[in-house]
Image (cartoon, rainbow, N blue to C red):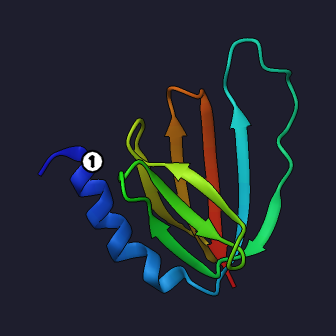
Amino acid sequence: MNPSKRTIAELHQEMPSLVDKKMGILIQDLADDAEPHSPALMERQLAKWEITEDEEHLRLYFNPCQFVAIPIQNGPVVFSQEDDCIRMVARDNRGQLAYRISFGN
């Protein structure tokens, strides 16, 4: 199984149990010319999720219309269990962004 198909299979396995959990979302700009500052934490409830038709992004919905799109094809997506939350880390190598999403109660 190639890495992108493995990632999609892992997302289908991990994501259903995270619906209705509180998300803490940090998006960090990794570009060389990015201004040095700490990213603001955005807290939302995960209402639903989906993978786009082109399988390039994972959409995490806060409500029926608003979502954050996490790239899943041009960098690794890693899940880990930490204390009282599940953490997802993704990277957008093209856009030079790092995504850290924690799912908790």
Q: Considering only vertical position in the picture, is 38 above or below 44?
A: above
Left or right: 101 in relation to 93: right
Q: Considering only vertical position in the picture, is 90 above or below 53?
A: above
Residue placed most toward the observer, 47 or 29: 47
Residue at 55% in and 62% down: 59
| Residue type of the residue flagged with mark 1 | Ser
Q: Residue furthest left?
A: 1
> How far across and how far down the image is residue 28, in percent?
71, 37
Residue at 55% in and 51% down: 70
SS at mark 1 in the image: helix
**Which image quadrant is residue 10 in?**
bottom left
Left or right: 72 in relation to 3: right
How many marks the image carries: the answer is 1
Residue placed most toward the observer, 100 or 67: 67
- Give the labeled residue for mark 1: 4
Q: Considering only vertical position in the picture, is 73 above or below 55?
A: above
Residue placed most toward the observer, 69 or 2: 69
> How far across and how far down the image is residue 16, in percent?
44, 83
Left or right: 68 in relation to 38: left
Crowding near pointer 1: few (<14 within 10 Å), some, many (20+)?
some
Q: Residue furthest top?
A: 33
Residue at 51% in and 47% down: 90
Residue at 67% in and 19% down: 31
> How far across and how far down the image is residue 98, in percent?
61, 39
